[in-house]
């Protein structure tokens, strides 16, 4: 990410919210040279377009005066900062496997998938419409999904695995994806490609009923 925009995200994370003038003053300290409010607004527009910064909101004032507009981080921006999720998840799965028999692990994984299905609130519509909904839902959760029509039926592609670093050692996560997709579509697909098997993407065939 462009350095100035990364600084803006860091400032908003530290302060919670900031006006353009506050961001400009703080940026000058970090980049060690002048920067205009117009330039800061340009960077904010880019960050808003990437859903990393929220739309400006009016700051409450205790005294009369011109309204001040503040910016805050959008939830998606949290993913741009270092985190320990992968390490935590790997250790958690390892502890579960060392403490519980495999059938109980499967029940936990299935419960996680069922919870996601419930949260998604999938509408009862034709399969093509459901595929569009599934693509939007999965892409929001980091899967980078799309679908296409083939001679055999519909094929759902997932170009990114949100837990790729874990799936090679914990195949239960692939089972979670299968249960999730089956529950969202209301159809059990056939998996025809897996990132965990060194393929470019995970793919699922949804046969057309004849």
Image: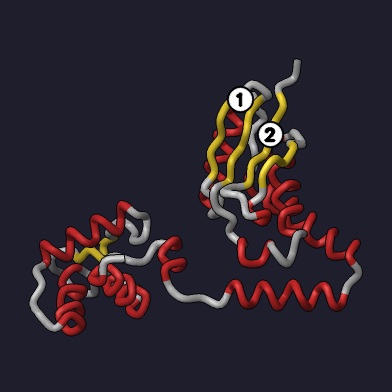
Instruction: Residue 46: give x, y in percent of width and height.
Output: 26, 56
Instruction: Residue 137: give x, y in percent of width and height.
Output: 56, 45
| Label of residue 150 in the image | 1
Above or below, 152 against 63 in this view is above
| Label of residue 205 in the image | 2
**Quarter of the image that includes the N terminus:** bottom left
Instruction: Residue 111: give x, y in percent of width and height.
Output: 78, 56
Q: CA distance from mark 2 to mark 1?
A: 9 Å
Q: Is residue 57 visible?
A: yes
Residue at the far top in the pictured view? 210
CB atoms of marks 2 and 1 within 8 Å: yes
Count of number-bearing discs: 2
**Quarter of the image that includes the C terminus:** top right
Instruction: Residue 112: give x, y in percent of width and height.
Output: 73, 58
Query: In which quadrant of the rendered view does residue 21 lie?
Result: bottom left
Above or below, 94 against 182 in this view is below
Name the residue nearer the viewer: 194 or 17. Answer: 194
Kindly identify the residue that appears in the image at 78 percent across and 78 percent down.
95
Q: Is residue 118 visible?
A: no
Above or below, 193 against 18 in this view is above
Residue count near mark 2 (Cα–Cα under 10 Å), binned few <14, some 14–19, many ≥20: many
Sequence-wise, which precedes: disc 2 or disc 1?
1
Kindly identify the residue that appears in the image at 89 percent across and 65 percent down.
102
Kindly identify the residue that appears in the image at 73 percent across and 34 percent down.
186
Display coloring: secondary structure
Kindly identify the residue that appears in the image at 41 percent across and 65 percent down.
77
Instruction: Indicate left or right for 12 with 111 as reference.
Output: left
Instruction: Indicate left or right for 131 with 40 as reference.
Output: right
Helix, strand or loop at disc 1? loop
Name the residue nearer the viewer: 107 or 188. Answer: 188
């Amino acid at each position: 990410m462009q350095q100035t925009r990364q600084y803006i995200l860091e400032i908003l994370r530290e302060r919670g919210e900031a006006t353009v003038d506050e961001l400009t003053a703080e940026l000058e300290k970090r980049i060690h040279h002048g920067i205009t409010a117009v330039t800061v607004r340009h960077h904010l527009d880019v960050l808003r377009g990437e859903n990393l910064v929220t739309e400006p909101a009016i700051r409450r004032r205790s005294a009369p005066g011109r309204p001040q507009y503040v910016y805050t981080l959008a939830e998606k921006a949290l993913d741009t900062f270092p985190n320990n999720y992968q390490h935590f998840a790997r250790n958690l799965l390892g502890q579960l496997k060392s403490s519980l028999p495999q059938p109980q692990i499967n029940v936990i994984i299935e419960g996680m998938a069922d919870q996601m299905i419930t949260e998604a609130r999938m509408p009862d519509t034709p399969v093509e419409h459901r595929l569009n909904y599934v693509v939007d839902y999965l892409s929001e959760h980091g899967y980078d999904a799309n679908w296409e029509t083939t001679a055999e039926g519909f094929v759902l592609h997932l170009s990114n695995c949100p837990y790729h670093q874990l799936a090679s050692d914990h195949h239960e996560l692939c089972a979670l994806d299968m249960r999730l997709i089956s529950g969202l579509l209301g159809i059990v697909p056939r998996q025809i490609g897996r990132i965990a098997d060194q393929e470019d993407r995970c793919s699922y065939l949804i046969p057309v009923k004849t």
